[in-house]
Image (spheres, coloured by chain):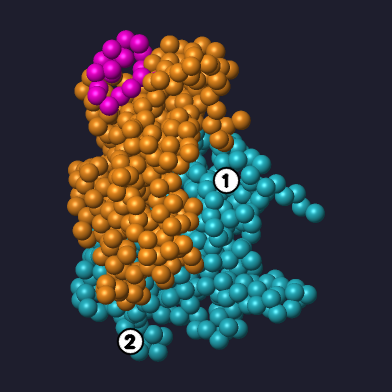
Chain colours: A cyan, B orange
Amino acid sequence: MEKRTEIGILGEFGLIKRISIPFEQHQGWTKLGIGDDAALLDSANQLTISTSELLIEGVHFDLSYTPLQHLGYKIVTVAVSDIAAMNGIPTQLMVNIGLSNRFSVEAVDELYAGIKSACEDYQIDLVGGDTTASPQGLIISVTALGVVDSNQVVTRSKAQPNDVICVSGDFGGALLGLQSLEREKQVFLANPDMQPELDNKSYVVLRQLKPTARFDIIHELREMGVVPTSMIDSSDGLAAEILHLCAASGTGARIFEKNIPIDDETYLAATEFNLSPLTAALNGGEDYELVFTVSQADFEKVEKIADVTAVGYMTNVPKEKVLVMKSDQIVTLTAPGFN
Amino acid sequence: MEKRTEIGILGEFGLIKRISIPFEQHQGWTKLGIGDDAALLDSANQLTISTSELLIEGVHFDLSYTPLQHLGYKIVTVAVSDIAAMNGIPTQLMVNIGLSNRFSVEAVDELYAGIKSACEDYQIDLVGGDTTASPQGLIISVTALGVVDSNQVVTRSKAQPNDVICVSGDFGGALLGLQSLEREKQVFLANPDMQPELDNKSYVVLRQLKPTARFDIIHELREMGVVPTSMIDSSDGLAAEILHLCAASGTGARIFEKNIPIDDETYLAATEFNLSPLTAALNGGEDYELVFTVSQADFEKVEKIADVTAVGYMTNVPKEKVLVMKSDQIVTLTAPGFN
C-alpha cells in the first residue's frame, strides 16, 4: 500500500517548509522568496508583468484522470503563458493551495514535483505559497511575474490592417485529449475492469494534460529582432483569441480554413468523436499556443520559424471577422462567449 | 424584493468588464491594468514586493454574518498588510473569484464595492482579475504588489538582542468580534425571530469585519527616519508573531503581560465569554496590527507615536521566549502551531 501521511502531522508551517525546500533559485533578482511576509524582487529598469489564475477541482480539472504531477506542471504553464503573450520572460511564481482532508502529504508532494519540474523548464523561482484547508476538493491560485523591456512589450491592441496573423503549433488537440479522457472515465465508471484505451491518443492526451508555454517562439522572435504588433495566448480557442485581438486593435480579420494547423491525430480523434476538426481548432481551447500579428515586412523573417503558420491577415473593416472555407465560402468567425 | 441578475446574463467577459469599470487608477507606474493577458508595472529602481492569499468560504469567512462589502475590504487588508510588514507601500492588486450559482451579479457588485473602497483607502490599483465558476461557495484569491527602497526593507530576521519589541494598536479584539458574531449566528439559527445583540460590541465586531492595515505607522516611522530591525503583521496572534521574529532572527524574547495593549471592550467581551483577555490577545489572530523591533536608540523616537506600545525586548538566549506575568511569575511564550 502506498504511504499516506496526514497533513495534520506536519501542520501548516511544516507543510510549507516541506514544499519550499526542494525548489532552487534560478533568477538573480529574486531578493527574498518564501519564508517572510512577502517576496522581494528587483526588476531593475525592466517592466514587471503580473498575472494571476484561480483553478478549482471539478471546474478546471478532474483528478480522476489528471495525475497530480501533470496538474502541477499545467498550472504553471497556464500562468506563464500569459507572460509569453506579453512578449515577456517569466521570472517568479506564487502558488497557494486549498486542500480537503482527502489529500495526504504525499499527494501534495506529487503536485509540487510537477510545479518544480515546470519551474526548472521555465527557469522561474517559487517565491510564495500558503496552504489552507478547503471544505471540498483542491483549489489552486497561481500568480506569475515576469519582465519585459518597455520597447519589447506586446499587447493585444496594436495590430494594423494587413498585418499577418500567425500562430504557433497546432489547434484542437487539447479538446480532443479532454474528450478522450472523459470517455475513458465514463467507460471506467460503467465497468471498473475495463482498461483505458488511450495508447493511440498519446498526442492529444498530452496536449490536454501537459501543455507547454511557447517561450521557444518568444526567444526566436527576439533573436530575429521581431516585435509582434499584437499577441495573445490561446486558452479559449483560436477564434476567440483572434476576435480578442480584433476587438482590442479595432481591426477586422480574414482567416483561411486551409491554413489552420491541425495535427493528424487531432483529425482522427475528432472524426471518432463525430466532431468537426475545424470546430475543435477554432473553439477548443487550452492549447496554450501563441496567436500574434506581424507586419508584412517582418513576416518574411517570421515565416522561417518552423512551428509558426500564417492563418490570415488583419483588415481595416472592424465589423468583418471572417473565415474563408476551403470551398471558398465565406462565413463569419464566431466564438462562444462573444456576442 | 431586491434585484437579482443571474451571472449567466452577463457572461464571464461581461462580468469582468462590469467589475473593472468603476476602479480608478492611483499609481502612475501602473502601465497596463485589466484587459490584456497580464498587468504591466514599472517599479523603476525600487524593489517589488509580492504576496498572495487564498480565501475560502466556510474556512476563512462566514457569509451568514459577513456583509460582502466588508469582506471585499477585508481581503484587500489581509493582502496589503503583508506589504506593510516588509515596510513597503502597496501599489497594485489582482483579485480572482470563484462563484457558485448562489451568487448574483448584485452580490458580486457588493463584494467589489468593498474592494474598491479599500483600493481608494490604500491608494492601490486593481490590475487583474478573473471570475470563474465554483462548485461550492465563494473562493477568492488576492495578490498584492508593493514597492520599497532597498535600504528600507524590513524582514523578520534582523532583530538584535536588547531591541525593543513594539506593537501597533491593541490585540484580541478580532477574536472576540468573531465569538460575538458566531454566538449571534447560533441564537439566530435556534430562533430566527431573535434580533442580534451586537450594539455594545461595535468595536470588537468591526475589528473582525473590517480590519485596517497599519500604513499610518509605516508612514510615521518613515517621517521619523526609523527603519525597524524586524517586522511582521499579526494574523495569527501576538505570541505566534513574536515567536516568528525570534525564530528568524535567532533571538530570545521577554515580554510583559502588563504592557500588552487590550481594549476595554475586548476585556468585557472576553469576560462575558469566559475567555482570558490575555489569551485572546496572545493567540487570537486576525488583528492585522504590526509587531516590530527597533534599537533602543530608535525607541526614543518611536515611543512618541500615539498608537505604538513597547511590550518587551529581544534577548540573546534564543531558547528562552518568556512572558512576565503581572504577578512576576515567568511563563514560556507559546502559540498554537509552534512546537
Identity of the amino acid at label 2? Ile
Q: Is residue B307 magenta?
A: yes
Q: Position of residue A339 (x, y in %)?
A: 29, 78
| Residue to which mark 2 is pinned | A330
Instruction: Read off the chain for label 2.
Output: A
Which is nearer the eye, A266 or B43? B43
Which is nearer the eye, A223 or A321? A321
Structural crowding at the residue carrying mark 1, measured as other residues with C-alpha within 10 Å and reported as few (<14), some (14–19) or many (≥20)? many
Say whether residue A224 is visible.
no
Q: Is residue B201 above or below residue B194?
A: above
Q: Residue at x 55, y 86 (%)?
A: A274
Magenta range is: B294-311
Q: Residue at x 49, y 48 (%)?
A: A96
| Residue to which mark 1 is pinned | A116
For this orientation, the residue located farthest to the right is A1
Q: Residue at x 59, y 78 (%)?
A: A269
* Cα–Cα gap, marks 2 and 1: 47 Å
Left or right of B178 on screen, residue B105: left
Residue A71 image-quadrant placement: bottom right
- Label 2 element class: strand
